[in-house]
Image (spheres, coloured by chain):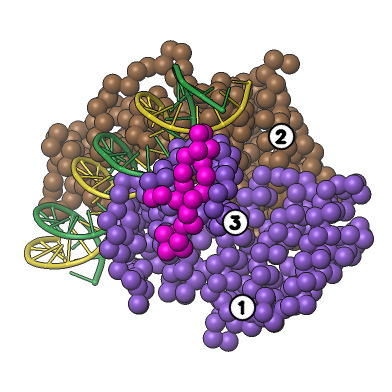
Chain colours: A purple, B brown, C green, D yellow
Amino acid sequence: MVKLFFMFKNETKKTAERTMKPDTVFKQTFNATLDILAGMKRGDVLPSENELSDQLGVSRTTVRKVLSWLSDNGHVRLDGRRRVLTAIVPKRERFPSTETESTSQQVEKRFMEWMLRGDAQPGSLINELEMARQFGVATTGIREFLNRFRRFGLIDKRPNAGWVFKGFTEDFADELFEIREMFEQRSARAMVTLPPDAPQWRDLRALREEHRLLLGDIDSRFQDFSDLDNRLHRLITTAVPNRFIDDFYDVITLIFHYHYQWNKRDERQRNEVAIEEHVHYIDALLARDRRRVEQTCRIHLASARQTLRRAFSPLV
Amino acid sequence: MVKLFFMFKNETKKTAERTMKPDTVFKQTFNATLDILAGMKRGDVLPSENELSDQLGVSRTTVRKVLSWLSDNGHVRLDGRRRVLTAIVPKRERFPSTETESTSQQVEKRFMEWMLRGDAQPGSLINELEMARQFGVATTGIREFLNRFRRFGLIDKRPNAGWVFKGFTEDFADELFEIREMFEQRSARAMVTLPPDAPQWRDLRALREEHRLLLGDIDSRFQDFSDLDNRLHRLITTAVPNRFIDDFYDVITLIFHYHYQWNKRDERQRNEVAIEEHVHYIDALLARDRRRVEQTCRIHLASARQTLRRAFSPLV
DNA sequence: CCTCGGTCCTTTAAGGATAAAAAATCGATA
DNA sequence: TATCGATTTTTTATCCTTAAAGGACCGAGG
């Protein structure tokens, strides 16, 4: 059987000593707090602990840890029960992105890179222990990732005997897009029947404007398409929410997120075509013309499918 | 916030001392080997180690462990390189089913029971540690289960802050069946276009016969319907395989498996109706009549949806 | 040349431990 | 009455450890 090796050339060796639970949340929060402070000047009063907690999406415990650091290092002064900014925090205090990524995020990233590089042969075995060693994490982290990754349809589990990589193949693209087409057509049809005062129409018009702006500046900003693509399709699915369809879009989002990072061939032109397809699709939706919606949707998905399929034959 | 307690009334306390990795595979293999020996008589030669390994679906290592026991306890004698059965193994040597279930299977079972009992309030929090204590397993086992269970659309993860049970509600049934209907109609339409010599037609005719037999003996065997239901729908999806559709059927299979165990109301009558619907559906497929297939499929799924929905209002 | 026993090594499935993060508690105070 | 500081308790994310299961190798024998 073919065994896999996950180490890439030019890989930087992991030297960081691992703690039990990483403090990536603290470090991210720290950076985010600095972003907030950057918009303030000396003498300004900081938001309250609860406000910061809400705004940053972390517990007050973590917020307080950051605020303690700011006090201890003389950037913030206590004035009664207010906190006052006394000194700007220099940029170099920010934690680098390598330290703000949790283990599970790192595993996902490295696994996807390994897969999309094309190093992975269909049918090859994935070994938890080997992967854990190469990624510098414990086997439990790998297990957890693989279990979550199962639903992407790219790996199979053989109990007591590891995992099989099924391959990032044309079959995969076809099966993915068969479902995607069913779901998208269903959502698009539902959207057409939404009442004219549904909030989706406002969002859709805003998205159309964003598409127009991007097309006007396509040469420098063509990489922003990925985000726009995701937002359009997610908006359409909100017409009639269904948790299984939402979950499926998670699969598509992840696949495309990494796919866009690795497949740079014809990127600019590919995205320009896709944006134009989107505009036609959006116009059809705004016109609430069911037949045209179905047609423009089909055209766009067919070309997206071709894009993904071509990623599997990199030499042609 | 509502907290959950997983301990049921009349629950038997776990007293078994836990080992690192349970030997459930050995115990299952042991029982399965006894089943094979039951079909033999004294003096018969056992199959080879490799044969047993293939047949039982476990490694030779495990097979050899069972064979060692048989030798050590005088039930099997070595004759050159053959093994000869010398004494029947008494039934009481079999391991009880409680010892042949792996931790992950136990966790799944107990979680599903807890959910389907209706003790779980929608929106309540699931606590890994609490659940681990109640189930008598380590937190890693719970985590792994919850991660795998995510795709069933019944729980949500909040990073660093546990899991939320979304509730086994009518919404869930509706969303599940919306997808199921799309997938089933798609597969049924594909099946109609299969060539007359496709192996599916043979299997379908066999299934039809099984339905007929079950209907004739409905009073004593109505519980066998669950298995038949699963096999029919799985057969139809093989018309044009798609890994995402297969995965979705795993969700349906598990939900129905436990649902059938807990919801006994009108069980016999419900199953009888469903079998008749199946027969009409199968006949339409065998006739390769697209319109009738769509119609009978819709009728059957609508009644299955009602069955599941009714399970959420147990007092009406 | 295939199969078996013996042996050994590798890998998975579980348990257990610990630091970080979340959450709760409680006066005090504005 | 909501907020803050201080402190404590609970829970998650991660690492490490170990027995069972899988798998490879080898020599012998039919």
Q: Mark 3 near mark 2, Cβ–Cβ under 8 Å?
A: no
Q: List x then y, in percent, for residue D21.
A: 28, 47
Q: Where is residue B109 in the image (x, y as percent from the top left)?
A: 47, 31
**Residue A83 at x, y = what percent?**
51, 41
Say which residue appears at 38% left-offset and 63% top-offset: A125
Which residue is label 3 attached to? Answer: A39
Is A230 in the magenta?
no
Magenta segment: does it hold A78? yes
Other residues around mark 3 within 10 Å, as few (<14) / some (14–19) / many (≥20): few
Taking depth in this image into account, of A183 and B212 the one nearest to the observer is A183
Q: Give the range drawn in magenta.
A: A73-94
Residue drawn 29% across the image and 53% down it: A18
Distance from disc 3 to disc 2, alpha carbons, whole Å, reads: 44 Å
Mark 2 secondary-structure assignment? helix
Residue that label 1 marks? A310
Closest to the observer, B10 or B187: B10
Residue A300: x and y in percent read 76, 70
Amino acid bearing label 3: Gly
Does the CB distance between marks 2 and 1 fall below 8 Å? no
Q: What element carries label 1?
A: helix
What number is the disc on residue B171? 2
Quadrant housing residue A257: bottom right
Residue at point 59%, 39% (across, down):
A51
What's the amino acid at mark 1?
Arg
